[in-house]
Image (cartoon, grey):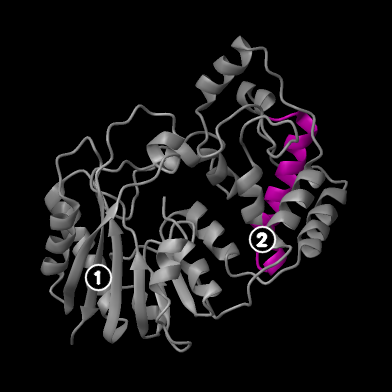
Amino acid sequence: MFPLEFPFSRLKNATPQDWVLDPFCGRGTTNFAARLRGLPSFGIDSNNVAFAITAAKYVNVKADEVVALCESILQDKSLPLDVPQDPFWELCYERSILIEICKIREHLLASCISESEIALRALMLGILHGPRQKEAGYLSNQMPRTYSSKPNYSVKYWIERNMKPPKLNLLDIVRRRAYFTFSRVPRPVPGGVFLADCRFPTLEKIGLPFNWVITSPPYFGMRNYAADQWLRNWFLGGPCIVAYDGKRQIITEEKSKFISELAKVWANVAKICDPGSHLIVRFGALPSLSTNPRILLKDSLKIASCGWRVTTVKNAGFSTQGKRQAEQFGCKIGTPVNEVDLYAKLEK
């Protein structure tokens, strides 16, 4: 998982006129670091959940405004048009909570333009599911926070443990989360996020010359986690069942294709960067695969053949305890592979 300190420290020498780009923005950590530095930025990702979360990193909103929007939606007496009904939904959410979730979902699907709406959407994605706590912070029955467990497994788990969905106060949870998140926000900066695939030349539509590109692409061999975010995808308008969507920004199973597709991204990014721009990439490898992240990354830049000159590659250590994606999924994992930080400059 991408730590905020990484892009924040690398941008210390940027000037106020510099634009920052992250072509694999994920949750928008680079973009938020740029905002903390007072720098304009754009993020790009092909994942709906990543797009929604990153969009909220740009809002300039007060907690009261987010709470007021949520309250006004819930005060509408009309029932939502689409409320899922099967054993999973009956056991995941208490009925009144599910109806309120669906009310908010339908409002945001119809309109998510204002900063309050964008903020509420991201906030709801964060509280949609998670562990049961003494002070309720999540809306679901017992579930992981980082991913949505599959329906059949979840139902079996809850029934075996006689776990009923909790009766909660959704507005109160939104209020507490809003005041925690939006009580103080950094000064706004220009920029935004695009839902796009960086392998294709859609980046030129931005029409800006960038000076800093700070990113972390998916590792070679990394699986597509779309199915593990199926509940959040449902909230964003997807189906109410697990959708095993094979779409992804980079093909990660075959090494030569992975390198080739990563090269397409570096070439497209170079087209919208000024000469002398900085490219900083944090990259690693899965312990289960015998790959050298340093070689993969350098090979992709060589194939791109677009002016990126590698100046240095440094060892970045490995992910700290509790922050590795595999640990968040409760997997048994081996010794992590050292990540690397690659630095390059654009020569044209």
From the viewer's perspective, tell me whether residue 293 is left or right of residue 332. Answer: left
Q: Position of residue 1 (x, y in %)?
A: 41, 50
Q: The disc labelled 1 sits on which kind of residue? A: Tyr
Q: Residue at x 62, y 37 (%)?
A: 129
The numbered mark, 2 or 1, whose residue comes first in the sequence reads: 2
Q: Residue at x 68, y 57 (%)?
A: 181
Q: Position of residue 204 (x, y in %)?
A: 35, 79
Instruction: Give the quarter of the image for residue 121.
Output: bottom right
- Residue 95 shown in magenta: yes
Instruction: Give the quarter of the image for residue 329.
Output: top left
Tag on residue 119? Answer: 2
- Mark pair 2, 1: CA separation: 34 Å
Q: Which residue is mark 1?
A: 343
- Range of the magenta residues? 93-120
Residue 312 lies, with reference to residue 107, above or below; the image says below
- Label 2 Cα crowd, 10 Å radius (few <14 / some 14-19 / many 20+): many
Instruction: Mark yes or no: residue 189 visible.
Output: yes
From the viewer's perspective, tell me whether residue 62 is left or right of residue 46. Answer: right
- Label 1 Cα crowd, 10 Å radius (few <14 / some 14-19 / many 20+): some
Q: The disc labelled 2 sits on which kind of residue? A: Ala
Residue 131 lies, with reference to residue 6, above or below; the image says above
Instruction: Mark yes or no: residue 195 visible.
Output: no
Mark 2 against mark 1, which lies toward the viewer? 1
Quarter that holds the C terminus? bottom left
- Residue 16 shown in magenta: no
Q: Residue at x 46, y 73 (%)?
A: 42
Q: Position of residue 151 (x, y in %)?
A: 54, 25
Which SS class for mark 2? helix
Residue 87 lies, with reference to residue 159, above or below; the image says below
Tag on residue 17? Answer: none
